[in-house]
Image (cartoon, helix red, strand yellow):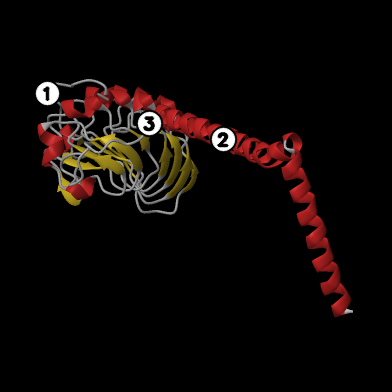
Amino acid sequence: MGERFSRIKILILRSNKFQGLLPRELCHLTSIRILDLADNNLYGNIPRCIGNFNVMMRESGMDADIVYTSDADFYSPYVENALLVNKGEMAEYNTILKFVRSIDLSKNGFSGEIPMEVTNLLTLQSLNLSHNSFTGRIPENIGAMSFLESIDFSGNQLSGEIPQSISKLTFLSVLNLSNNKLSGKIPLSTQLQGFNASCFTGNELCGPPLPNDCTTSVPTSSNQNREKDGNEDEVDWFYVSMALGVVVGFWSFLGPLFFNRRWRCTYFQFLNHLHDKLGSVVRKCY
């Protein structure tokens, strides 16, 4: 499809039963403005060549309407319109369709890391990768996508901290990072602190707009190692003191027997007396 129809501007195939890998040939769609493959059974990694969508890489200035004409109906051109899910809502676009730049791959089985090449799409407005199995970190340079208005990465397995560069997205009005494995402090910006706390829940994040702050110190690995080393030192001293106690107790009892004859005689008389008593008890039992 990408090789034979490279001039396609809008490709909407959502809510079908397509399955398999995402074809690398789609990267030849250099004129694509809207790519919607949501709610299918696609899986595997997103090709890194997704950063080759030329129209999404640059600001086009005055975009022409998406118009179709034919020789038979030259004076009545057809202006394209489309139903799009943007910012979580379905809406019909017609006159402003030419300005929309959107990628929606949500509700599939995609895995692996989000390719860093996606940050080459500087004029992309909406990026929805939710409800997949993406791992790894959010691309550090996501803040370079200055036209982004909507980001939805919810329902994945993304980890690490939220990149500081995301605070540069001044047009961002929709953000959902919930139900991942993100950790650390939410970057400070006017946009991020203005979102509802539900946009960040299901992670190990802290700071506004979440109610839990980041002042509680979490033991680092170095602190844990130092604590472990300290415990090991305590255990060693415990065994040393126990061995020293045994030695002192042993010689405190046997020392006088070796060096004092009167104590030695008294001790052996006591043992003989004890032996006689035990012998009489045993004889009575039998």
The reply, left or right, for residue 65 in relation to residue 225 is left
Q: Which residue is mark 3?
A: 220
Label 1: few (<14), some (14–19) or many (≥20) C-alpha neighbours in 10 Å: few
Nearer to us of marks 3 and 1 is: 3
Q: Which residue is mark 1?
A: 62
Q: CA distance from mark 1 to mark 2?
A: 84 Å
In contact (CB < 8 Å): disc 1 and disc 2: no
Task: Tell me: residue 91, above or below residue 243.
Answer: below
Q: Residue at x 56, y 32 (%)?
A: 236
Report helix, strand or loop for mark 2. Answer: helix
Report helix, strand or loop for mark 3. Answer: loop
Looking at numbered disc 1 in the image, what kind of residue is underneath it?
Met
Viewer can see residue 178: yes
Report helix, strand or loop for mark 1. Answer: loop
Q: Which residue is mark 2?
A: 241
In contact (CB < 8 Å): disc 2 and disc 3: no
Residue 108 coordinates in the image, percent (x, y)? 41, 48
Q: Quadrant of residue 58?
A: top left
Q: 241 or 247: nearer the eye?
A: 247
